[in-house]
Image (cartoon, helix red, strand yellow):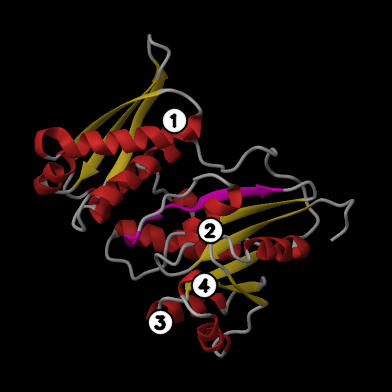
Amino acid sequence: MSETEFHSGFVAIVGRPNVGKSTFLNRVVGQKVAIMSNKAQTTRNKIQGIYTTDHSQIVFIDTPGIHKPQNKLDEFMLNSATSSLNEVDAVLFMVSVKDKMGSGDAFILEQLKHVKQPVYLIVNKIDTVHPNDLLPFVEQYQAEFDFANVFPISALEGNNVDELLTALNQNLPVGPQYYPDDQITDHPEYFVVSELIREKILELTRDEVPHSVAVNVERMRRNDNDKLKVEATIIVEREGQKGIIIGKGGKMLKEIGTRARRDIEHLLGDKVYLQLWVKIDKNWRDNPRYLNELGYQKKNY
């Protein structure tokens, strides 16, 4: 890569749910732009994170984890993930060394066979296994696909992440700088704020809630005390889920709000007053109008 030329491009990150795509993206950009949870289907939209150096810019697209769709929201997530493969300069196929190769990996590899751009195998969570276990794990995948390169990394600890970024930079085409130096995501603040609130719900509630919850930020405006007032609605499908999120005496909702407010203040660099409501909509995941209002739109894939 020439020192005098600027190189830029788009790189998609694909993989099964929970392999560490969001953790990787947040480490690369140096700030939380994608929420993290051990629950499946944490990422629902394509999240763009922007990594800029003096000589290059990589726009990463963190796609939803690819899985068999069960409803219209799942269909949106699958279309969102697979469509990004046709828009980029390279693809990172991320797998977790902790997980055995499964049917989900086979499905993704089948999609990747139609991709003309370089595909890199990213073996994440190497900090959790003995180095001797890595080679046989990698060989399983190399037997199924001709990867441009293989990078064992730890997105959590940072192992080999810089080496991966260097390799990507060296192979980017000459191109313009798409975003300013200090911009780390293309998503509006409303979206990132709603995701931070949803992350706290995933952290604090039981398994029956996360897949059935959405967050809609209604408005953000400065109040008379010069605090930024954020008003958001948490949407669930059943009365029991509403009860779980509110908690006894409103304790759970208060804890969700407290944790989310800290992250929102860190993100925006501002004092925040966060007001949360909870409402029930039994069929929101199958309602195209509602999905559109919540940002799960066809234009996003």
Q: Earlier in the sequence, mark 3 or mark 2?
A: 2
Task: Kindly state the secondary structure of the residue where label 4 is placed.
Answer: helix
Spot occupied by residue 240 in the image (x, y as percentages of width and height): 9, 48
C-alpha span from label 4 to label 3: 14 Å
Q: Earlier in the sequence, mark 3 or mark 1?
A: 3
C-alpha span from label 1 to label 2: 22 Å
C-alpha span from label 4 to label 1: 33 Å
Where is 288 relative to 81, above or below? above
In the figure, is residue 125 to the left or right of 201? right
Task: Kindly state the secondary structure of the residue where label 3 is placed.
Answer: loop
Spot occupied by residue 61 in the image (x, y as percentages of width and height): 55, 56
Name the kind of residue labelled 4 in the image.
Ile
Question: Which residue in the protein does label 2 denote?
Answer: 24
Name the kind of residue labelled 3 in the image.
Lys
Mark identifier at residue 3:
none
Which residue is found at the position 42% from the left and 70% from the top? 16
Question: Which residue in the protein does label 3 denote?
Answer: 100
The magenta stretch spans which residues?
38-52
In the figure, is residue 61 to the left or right of 78? right
Name the kind of residue labelled 2 in the image.
Phe
Mark identifier at residue 265:
1
Labels 4, 3: front one? 4
Question: Which residue in the protein does label 4 denote?
Answer: 126
Spot occupied by residue 7 in the image (x, y as percentages of width and height): 78, 54
